[in-house]
Amino acid sequence: MESGKWKVKRGKGEVENEKKSIARFEDMIVWQKSMDLVVQVYDICRARELVRDWGLREQLRRAAVSIPANIAEGFERHSRKEYHQFITIAQGSAGELRCLLQIVSRLGLLPGDTTAAVLDKALEISRMLKGLSKSLKT
């Protein structure tokens, strides 16, 4: 299937653009950064205040894990449309994570600088996913 500068080859899960071919989702910078974000979220969830709030802690973790998992699942699908769908789900999870981090910050469960660093990373990933989504549409 070919459209614009992106190409999805059926059966191989390979995505190409004019400059670089990406054969595995593990090679995608947005996936790598989202994996780093998962580690950051798990680290902050070990804070004493969040250890006691099981529901919020687990929702933070699930939202973070959902981002790279949906990037990977979409990449492995056999159509551009399905890939785009999973990227939009990852975008939604990134937005959910940013909202939850702001809740944590407003409740004073973690120091502001701690949540700000993770929020910055989540916002960067949101922007990257938005760009990827746009490129898959054209």
Image (cartoon, helix red, strand yellow):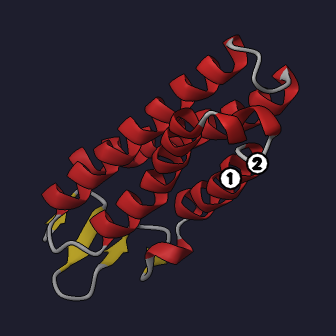
In the image, taking residue 115 as reference, residue 113 lies left or right, namely right
Name the secondary structure under disc 2.
loop
Residue 128 position, x and y percent, is 51, 44
Q: Amino acid at mark 2?
A: Arg
Q: Looking at the image, which residue is at 75% across and 43% down?
A: 44
Kindly indicate whether the residue at mark 2 contacts the one at mark 1 (C-beta within 8 angstroms): yes
Residue 48 position, x and y percent, is 81, 38
Residue 51 position, x and y percent, is 70, 42
Residue farthest along the bottom direction in this orientation: 12
Tell me the residue that label 2 is attached to.
46
Q: Quadrant of the N terminus?
A: bottom left
Q: Looking at the image, which residue is at 67% across and 31% down?
A: 119
How many tags in the picture?
2
Q: Is residue 138 visible?
A: no
Tell me the residue that label 1 is attached to.
42
Residue 14 versus residue 50: which sits nearer the camera? 50
Q: Which mark is residue 105?
A: none
Which of label 1 and label 2 is nearer to you?
Answer: 2
Q: Amino acid at mark 1?
A: Tyr
Q: Looking at the image, which residue is at 36% across and 36% down?
A: 92
Residue 105 position, x and y percent, is 71, 19
Q: CA distance from mark 1 to mark 2?
A: 7 Å
Residue 14 versus residue 120: which sits nearer the camera? 120
Residue farthest along the front direction in this orientation: 52
